[in-house]
Amino acid sequence: MPRRRLSSFALALALGFALARPASADVIHLKDGGALEGTAKEDGAVYVITLASGATVRVPKDKVDSIEAKPLPARPPASAAPAGGPAAPGADKLPAAPESPKGADGRPLLGWTYSDPFQGFRIRLPYHWIEGKAGQGAAATFTARSGEGYLPRLAVLPRGSGASVVDAAAQLRQQFAAGFPGITLLPDRPLSIGGRSAIQFEATFNSEGNALHGVQTCIEGAGVKYFLLFTGPQSGYEPFASAIKASIESFQCLPLDAVPADARDKFRQSLDRGMAAYKTSHTEDAVREFQAAAAAVPQHPVPHRNLAALYGTLKNVDAALKEYQALVNLTPDNPEAWFNLASMYRQKQKYEDATATYEKVLLLDPEFAEAHMNLGALYELKGQTEKALASLKRAVELDPNSASAHFNLGQVHLERADGASARREFERTLELAPDHKLAKEQLEKLKQLGK
């Protein structure tokens, strides 16, 4: 379709597109190590938390450790040999993972690779999974991106290498048995993971009335053991069970001496000070310390991710863009990092770069709904209406509860002079977001035009 000159009405439509941005919401940290994301309001002795899906969860105040009202940088990695054994994982009352897609050979498709040279491991994540806030003692925690219900998660905990892997797994079983009365523990499975001896067992148990399924794995590393702790809902576990196990079996140990001891010490100290400064709102100090951590261990992604989040909060788009560029160089198959980089290009009005980068996101993860939505909005701004229509239809298919996707799709229908379809999308937008001002305005304009 040839590019046409926009009337003032059409220009208003084009500028009215809503684009998804990196997530920002209250983060409610629970005392059991879990976390919820949503909007928290007090109601007597409980917090009422509205999740992104619109569902609400009531959490007693005495179960809540803290509430963060802005995006959190990653917490620093735990020491390779902290005191005590692995803590039993909690479970987040967040959306559950969809069924994991499979390749032509029937094996589950895995997503991007997380690598931690500081703690000495690498792991490929299940499809659609992202890095979350690390729990107590965890070097890293990963969760499904979206869904409805419980959000399954996988935590990686390095521990000192004292007992044998068999004895370490037995101690872990004892901790679960003591911590969850009535737990059902399945027999141990000896495994070889990345050429290392490992023991894995599964368990079903209840935590605060929630029926959970666990897959717990102990791997013998070089001078350190790694505990990989998976927790998810019993209901619906089977659709993603094969992907969880494939992810665990992709785990590889990296040389712990790849980072010199003095650099490791400086990295840990700088990251710790940076987190302390961030938590007390000393932003400039936090930036300086995260920069020092990045200089000490340039190949570690966490300082760059923290800096990007902080610069985004400070509206320093140039600096945030630079850090996201560093992050995608370190994690080139991470669709979330590419998505955030695309969003920085979009904020800089570098629309060609933003379009190419959103397209890169969809090569890595074809079911990334927000990338489809933002790409559709950019296509429309560039006059590529049919490409915009296809992208936004796909966004709505993948996330039917996204008010922004429905609104943007309505905008494209208006551009195509399809008033009936536009009305349907704007009405759906208001069902999902009753205060959506632009949708109300567009419906009123359609009414005035008799459409």
Image (cartoon, rainbow, N blue to C red):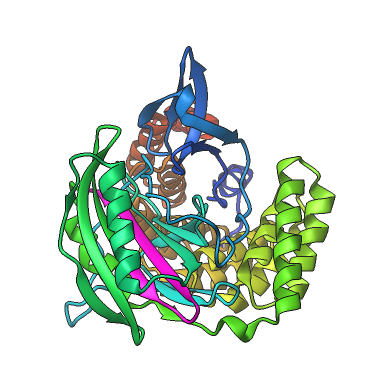
Q: Would residue 227 appear left or right of 28 to someone viewing this image?
A: left
Q: Is residue 442 above or below residue 197?
A: above
Q: Position of residue 242 (x, y in %)?
A: 21, 68
Can residue 140 be seen? yes
The quadrant holding residue 34 is top left
Q: Would residue 385 appear left or right of 210 to someone viewing this image?
A: right
Q: Residue at x 36, y 39 (%)?
A: 93
Q: Residue at x 71, y 43 (%)?
A: 279
Nearer to me, 89 or 44: 89
- Give the mark count: 0
Q: Residue at x 41, y 30 (%)?
A: 430
- Look at the image and give the residue range highlighted in magenta: 218-233
Q: Residue at x 28, y 65 (%)?
A: 244
Q: Is residue 434 above or below residue 378?
A: above
The quadrant holding residue 112 is bottom left
Nearer to me, 360 or 41: 41
Nearer to me, 10 or 390: 390
Q: Position of residue 310 (x, y in %)?
A: 72, 53
Residue 228 magenta-highlighted: yes
